[in-house]
Image (cartoon, helix red, strand yellow):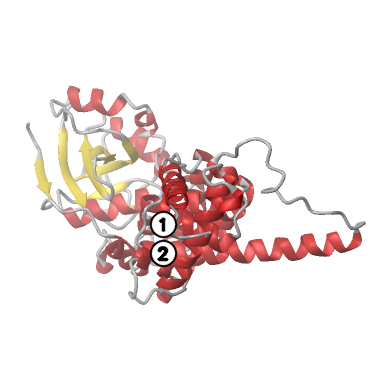
Amino acid sequence: MANVAAVSAPALEPRSDRDLLDAHRAGEPRAFGELVARHRDRLWALAMRIVHHPDDAADALQDALVSAYRGCDSYRGEAAVGTWLHRIVVNTCLDRLRRDRAHALTLRGLLPRQEQPDHAEHLVTRLTVQEALALLAVDQRLAVFLVDVKGYPMAEVAAILGVPVGTVKSRCARGRLRLAALLGHLRRDLL
Amino acid sequence: MSDSDPRVHAALAATQAELARMPTEAMPGPVAARLDAAFAQLDASTAVHTGLVPASRQINMKKRRRGAPRRLPLLTAAATAFVLAVGLPELTGTAAGSGVVLDGPDPAGLAAAATTVLAARPGAGAAGERFDAATAPFQDGGAVPRCLAKAGAAREPEPTTALGGRAALFAGQPALFLVLGTRTLGRFRVVVVTPGCTAVLTEALLGQ
């Protein structure tokens, strides 16, 4: 090839999550986007399990990740970068859930009192796993989702949720039992 | 309930098996695009970018726009058409939303120009677009392979998607500066070709 002065950089390994976060801290554009792209599906699934509605999940996820973008100096290296991102998403989604619930409770207080149906007792048709998961308390749901659906190690789930490993185990145990009943695997008289 | 009851064990095992079979949920495209846009906006608001560009080569665009006189090199008539349309910055190895001036195949200069092209954001006028008028045709996915093939520098199976480009002066010669994607995130190929794609003047692999 005439008139070509090829200049090749040495072959480099893909950067680790930590490398990308450090690059972002150093001001490299797109480093944070590249980091998030590696985790985006898992973070999306996590947000959806907490807030359920796609619009709410998208809002919560954006709030969480913009917060992480700006607050990258809060990362101390005590957990993996992915764990840190997961924890920020969990906390942001839970904050949103609490805010929405407080708003809903305020509205409910203004309305005539109605009996709340017990979904488990009035189950006629078998629930899908997603539907059954949605009926769990959020702390049990997150523990079961991260451990049994996503296959994360207990210690990582504990770090994401900010609770001891023993708490994750007990939440999983209680959540699985309730799910077993909701999914029709366990007769109620055995509960 | 007894934990040792085999029916409970079987029920829990079936539950966990069902949980493990839950389909993976991918982030919907519009949500991913929205996040990308949010990060791009945040990136654009960052005052100093480092990384590909050594600090010594970073460009104070505001200062340059305010006062620095633009160099008007002697150009051939054929080159004048596209260069006049975009102007030329004073600094070498830069892309200021106008043309790129490169002294030669200096990697630092190529990296500086590539970074500035890739950092361009829509909405900031000419400087905010990744392609200028001279390189706009390369937004067509087939244009880069055709150009490289014509120049006798086809790259197969290396992807040759153009991510951005600028009209350029390379060692005083009219040229087109193109930033191409590769199979590796964060790694780019820059190619400088003659305006008619008759020859590749230089190329470099940048990034990590």
Q: Secondary structure at mark 2?
A: helix
Q: Is residue A99 left or right of residue B86?
A: right
Q: Is residue B78 visible?
A: yes
Residue B89: x %, y % from top left: 35, 53
Residue position for label 1: A147
Numbered circle sitting on residue B14: none
Residue at image coords 53%, 59%: B1
Give above or below for B128 relative to A125: below
Q: Quick one: label 2 or label 1, which is nearer the N terminus?
A: 1
Res B163 quadrant in image: top left
**Residue A143 screen position, x and y as percent:** 48, 60
For badge 1, the amino acid type reads Val
Crowd band around label 1 with a 10 angstrom C-alpha radius: few (<14), some (14–19), many (20+)? many
Q: Position of residue A60 (x, y in %)?
A: 58, 57
Disc 1 element: helix
Residue at 60% x, 44% y is A131
Circles 2 and 1 on the same chain: yes
Q: Label 2: chain?
A: A
What is the spatial separation of the Cα atoms under label 2 and label 1, in whole angstroms? 7 Å
**Would you name the residue on which mark 2 appears?**
A157
Q: Nearer the viewer, residue A147 or B195?
A: A147
- Quarter of the rendering occupied by the C terminus of chain A: bottom right
Q: Are dots 2 and 1 in contact, CB under 8 Å?
A: yes
What residue is shown at x 39% (from left), y 32% (from top)? B136
Task: Identify which amino acid the numbered label 2 is placed on.
Answer: Val
- In the image, taking residue B31 as reference, residue A98 lies left or right, namely right
Residue furthest to the left: A2
Q: Nearer the viewer, residue B144 or B196?
A: B144
